[in-house]
Image (cartoon, rainbow, N blue to C red):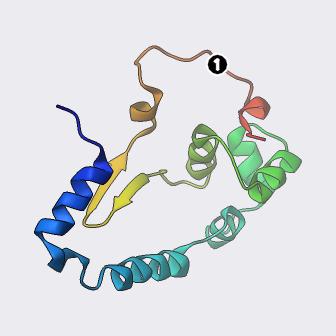
Amino acid sequence: MRKKFSELREKLYREHPELLEGREERIQALIDHSKRHQRTLAEVRKARALTQVEVARAMQLDQPQVSKLEKRTDAYLSTLENYVQALGGELKLLAVFEGETFELTLSDLAGDTEAAPEREPELALAG
């Protein structure tokens, strides 16, 4: 029988109220930690001592497209992966829950193993 997560969570907290002790403080500590370690794409690029022109060349894009990407608030994961690879790194995606962290891969998110049709690099930028 399937149960909603909210029902399971409520049951867990009823049976183990000690889990609620300090919960808000732990959540705030995670948020604070995350904020201290957040960096913009441009900050990471500059820390790697690279110019937008160099990143554009590695991504096979024009410099204005890299500038636009660095200013976006939303982008495809594949575009971010290409950007990070152009910086010489590897993109890792984490799903963080209280007490558990899972590393996700882009192929996990694709769902199936069939190759998606190739896109032109400039079309890979999200809106």
Q: Position of residue 75 (x, y in %)?
A: 68, 45
The percent position of residue 45, horizontal first and vertical second, equals 67, 64
Left or right of residue 112, residue 53 in this image:
right
Residue in view at x 63 percent, y 48 percent: 83
In screen coordinates, is 12 left or right of 127? left
Residue at 19% x, 75% y: name it.
19
Quadrant of the snapshot with the N terminus:
top left
Camera-side residue of 80 and 4:
4
Disc 1 packing (10 Å; few <14; some 14–19; many ≥20): few
The three-letter amino acid code for the residue at tag 1 is Glu
The picture quadrant where one finds residue 20 is bottom left
Picture quarter with the C terminus: top right
Q: Which residue is mark 1?
A: 118
Q: Nearer the viewer, residue 100 or 2?
A: 2
Q: Nearer the viewer, residue 8 or 26?
A: 8
- In this picture, residue 22 sits left or right of residue 87: left
Q: Position of residue 106 (x, y in %)?
A: 46, 37
